[in-house]
Image (cartoon, grey):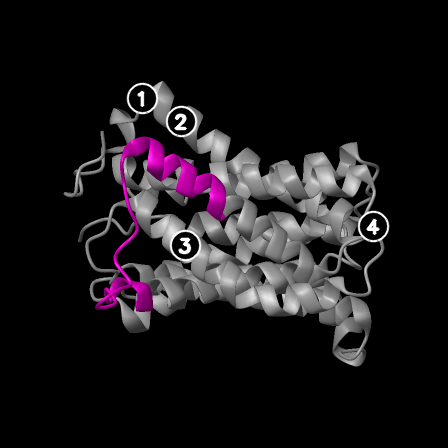
Amino acid sequence: MEHSTTPVAPTHDQHSLLDWARLLAVAVLWGTAFILLKIAVTEIPPTTLVMGRLWIGAIALLIWMAIRGQKLPPLFPVMDVRWVWFMVLGFTGATAPFALVSWGQQSLDSALVGILMAIMPLTTAALAHVFVPGEAMTTRKFAGFLLGLAGVALLMGPDALHDLGGSASLAQLAVILGAIFYAVQAIIARNLPATRPSVAAAGLLVCAALMITPFGVYAALDMTMPSTKALLSLLVLGLGSTGLGGIVLMVIIRDNGPSFLSLSNYIMPLIAVLVGLAFGEKLGLTVWLGFAVILFGLALARQKNKSV
């Protein structure tokens, strides 16, 4: 049963096997999303794909809420102020990043996209320095952030500087911008008025779906009927990483806090790489080096300074 109050997150040695199983589950759901996107976006326009996964995820969460006896905040006769938050969080955490990443995956391997997304927690640390009291950018965090940027530069390669208009470079920049949007959402979400996690997730998904629908419908007008494989990928994407992933995400935040959840950023890129390799994708030496540099930067940024 959910509670309106936020429990104190357990310390590292207090996390149960179930806690770690949940963390692994959400990392798997997110890590496998990239190969599903890669399969679906070859036949479904990016905005239509985003529209589909958002509505599937939103409906799944609304059903979950109904089972739990929960309701969305009222819209009439007076709109609850939380709807404004849902719209902002829905755009920054779903509509914009989903569309950017889906567009980027038209020309990028899923493994590379998963690695590029690892820049998100590093960006969050940089933004928190400015916008979140008590989250100052320490020397260690700054070094980790710079290492993460160096890893992204390695992934993009030196040719990107001479070919910023090229499709591959633009696709990588789109994915990085999507990761930045996720980081912005993480900062904004800290100030969300008291709301049950499942209600907040459903509300922002509904708003995100409504925002992308006109563009998704328009793009679908010229779309031929996708194959069963593409439609199944969309269905699993909506029910899995978007719907079920949203529920598991909220449970982890409720029971363990966002710091424990951030550990998934170590696992998710690795899963994306392994799944991509299993589907025949090839990664060159530069990609592996960039991957290692980003993970090392993330580990460095997450380390806490010892008291002096």
In the image, what residue occupies the spot 81% across and 52% down? 43
Contact, CB < 8 Å: mark 2 with mark 1? yes
Q: Nearer the viewer, residue 146 or 116?
A: 116
For residue 172, what is the image quadrant? bottom right
Sequence-earlier tag: 2 or 3: 2
Please, what is the three-letter code of the amino acid marked with disc 2? Trp
In the rendered image, the vertical position of residue 1 relative to residue 294, given as above or below:
above
Front-most of residues 193 and 207: 207
Please check the rendered image and state whether residue 112 is part of the magenta-colored stretch, yes or no.
no
How far is disc 4 from disc 3 in space, using C-alphas? 46 Å
Q: Amino acid at mark 3?
A: Ala
- According to the image, label 1 marks what residue? 16
Magenta span: 58-84
Q: Secondary structure at mark 2?
A: helix
Distance of mark 2 from mark 3, alpha carbons? 21 Å
**Alpha carbon separation for disc pair 1 and 3:** 25 Å
Percent coordinates x, y for residue 107 in the rendering:
80, 59
- Pick whichever of labels 4 and 2 is earlier in the sequence: 2
